[in-house]
Image: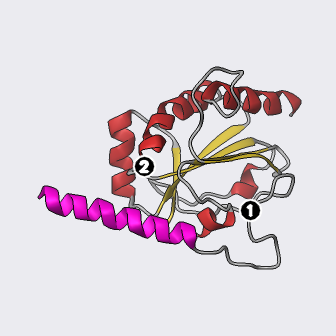
């Protein structure tokens, strides 16, 4: 039983790594998300039903976090992301929790285990992950109200307070700063 579970986890991790190494498809726009440019569209299935649409969230500050249930740093970031989403629930803010190629049942079990209620979407084929140039999980992107990529972090958030770049408090300050300019 444990051997089968371990093999499944390794297979998912290898599959995820393979997807992260594939180049993004080019369709006349930049192949990979670039700071100061329009953020690539995210149209993915939402856990629990429906389809996400980043373009429909224009006018909101959007934080996009790419992750997977098997990713240890992702697990440590989730409570802080949930806290930010909860604190800003009445603001023009959306947090996209983009899971890389796992099924809805696994994501729902993960969210229940960690007490999360995030807007989770599934990148089934890795296309959004590649379009954003994600090479490490977790990765975080901040998009302003005009749909422009404002900040990006490839890799886990740093530990520290609001004075430490890419810490959870620092990121929360960046989101609030964009909301204040809205």
Q: Is residue 20 magenta?
A: yes
Q: Residues within 10 Å of mark 2 (few under 14, many from 20)?
A: few
51 vs 80, nearest the viewer: 80
- The residue that appears at 66% across and 61% down in the rendered structure is 42
The answer to whether residue 156 of the structure is visible from this angle is yes
Q: Residues within 10 Å of mark 1 (few under 14, many from 20)?
A: many
Dot 2 corresponds to which residue? 71
The answer to whether residue 125 of the structure is visible from this angle is no
The residues tagged by marks 1 and 2 sit, at their Cα atoms, a distance apart of 24 Å
Could you tell me if the residues under marks 1 and 2 are in contact, i.e. CB atoms within 8 Å?
no
Screen quadrant of the C terminus: top right
- Which one is in front in this view, the residue at disc 1 or the one at disc 2? 2
Residue 35 coordinates in the image, percent (x, y): 82, 53
Dot 1 corresponds to which residue? 40
What colouring method underlies this structural image? secondary structure
129 vs 145, nearest the viewer: 129
Q: Which residues are magenta?
A: 1-21
117 vs 81, nearest the viewer: 81
Q: Is residue 165 above or below residue 70?
A: above
- The residue that appears at 66% across and 41% down in the rendered structure is 94
């Amino acid at each position: 039983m444990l051997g089968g579970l371990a093999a499944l986890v390794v297979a998912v991790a290898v599959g995820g790594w393979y997807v992260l190494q594939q180049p993004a498809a080019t369709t006349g726009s930049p192949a990979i998300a670039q700071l100061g440019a329009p953020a690539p569209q995210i149209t993915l299935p939402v856990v629990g039903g429906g389809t996400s649409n980043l373009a429909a969230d224009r006018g909101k500050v959007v934080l996009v976090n790419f992750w997977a249930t098997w990713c240890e740093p992702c697990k440590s970031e989730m409570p802080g992301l949930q806290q930010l989403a909860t604190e800003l629930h009445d603001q023009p803010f959306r947090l996209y929790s983009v899971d890389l190629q796992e099924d809805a049942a696994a994501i729902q079990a993960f969210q229940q285990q960690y007490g999360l209620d995030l807007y989770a979407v599934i990148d089934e084929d890795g296309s959004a992950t590649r379009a954003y140039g994600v090479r490490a999980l977790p990765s975080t992107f901040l998009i302003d109200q005009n749909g422009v990529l404002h900040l990006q972090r490839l890799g886990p958030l740093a530990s520290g307070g609001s004075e430490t770049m890419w810490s959870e408090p620092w990121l929360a300050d960046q989101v609030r700063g964009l909301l204040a300019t809205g």
